[in-house]
């Protein structure tokens, strides 16, 4: 599927936190990245992607992958703002932080695609299962649309792949915000444990 204006509009509707990115070029790159990621799959909106951390981990009882991205972006910005209010400036780039948070799971359309899951499950010996996890695929998406290296890094190293590198300041915050999102939601009973 080509990247269409419908997909771009769909991304803008899903992610109102785009408004927190002051730089218009960066904001448009985030939209382009998600539209590109969706265009490579059967998904036409971020909401259609299963609301879980991995394809086989417990899903949110309510809310979708869009709420996950929105939640992580808001937690990340709140964490940065709260710390800086108490400690003074810490050198956090708020625009990059918001873009990185909204883009950290860019590879999920590819990894969560039911068509890809069925193909991989049918013969894991062929290209692996999954062939590429979402952090690595997210790097491909982020680089393809020309997102800044700081956002590419967060897509690639927000999760366990990041244990092999030193995380940037913004990615450290996104990593914690991502973890906080799932951990707090699980404790609050917001995940279906028996699927
Ligand atoms: Fe992730
Ligand atoms: Fe995430």
Image (spheres, rainbow, N blue to C red):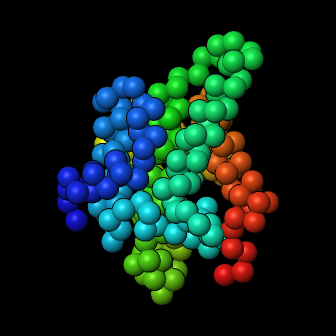
Residue at (36, 32) in percent of width and height? 26
> Is residue 24 shown above or below 162?
above
Residue 36 appears in view: no
Residue at (52, 26) in percent of width and height? 94
Residue at (53, 23) in percent of width and height? 93
Q: Is residue 122 left or right of residue 163?
A: left
> Is residue 121 shown above or below 164?
below
Residue 24 appears in view: yes
Q: In which quarter of the image is the N terminus?
A: bottom left
| Location of residue 81 (image quadrant) | top right
At which x and y percent is residue 140? 40, 50
Residue at (59, 22) in percent of width and height? 92
Q: Is residue 147 left or right of residue 9?
A: right
Q: Residue furthest right?
A: 187
At which x and y percent is residue 36? 30, 54
Q: Which residue lies furthest to the top in this view?
A: 88
Counting labels gives 0
Q: Nearer the viewer, residue 84 or 158?
A: 84
At which x and y percent is residue 139? 45, 47
> Is residue 180 shown above or below 61?
above
At which x and y percent is residue 39? 29, 61
Q: Quadrant of the C terminus?
A: bottom right
| Location of residue 21 (image quadrant) | top left
């Amino acid at each position: 599927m080509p990247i269409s204006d419908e997909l771009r509009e769909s991304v803008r509707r899903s992610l109102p936190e785009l408004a927190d990115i002051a730089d218009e070029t960066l904001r448009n790159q985030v939209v382009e990245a998600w539209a590109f990621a969706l265009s490579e799959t059967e998904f036409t909106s971020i909401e259609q992607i299963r609301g879980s951390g991995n394809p086989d981990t417990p899903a949110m009882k309510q809310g979708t992958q869009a709420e996950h991205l929105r939640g992580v972006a808001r937690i990340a910005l709140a964490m940065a703002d709260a710390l800086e209010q108490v400690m003074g400036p810490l050198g956090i780039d708020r625009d990059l932080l918001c873009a990185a948070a909204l883009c950290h799971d860019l590879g999920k359309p590819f990894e969560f695609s039911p068509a890809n899951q069925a193909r991989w499950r049918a013969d894991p010996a062929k290209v692996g299962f999954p062939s590429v996890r979402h952090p690595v695929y997210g790097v491909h998406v982020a680089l393809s649309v020309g997102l800044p290296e700081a956002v590419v890094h967060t897509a690639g190293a927000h999760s366990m792949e990041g244990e092999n590198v030193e995380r940037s300041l913004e990615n450290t915050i996104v990593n914690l915000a991502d973890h906080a999102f799932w951990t707090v939601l699980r404790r609050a009973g917001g995940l279906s444990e028996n699927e």
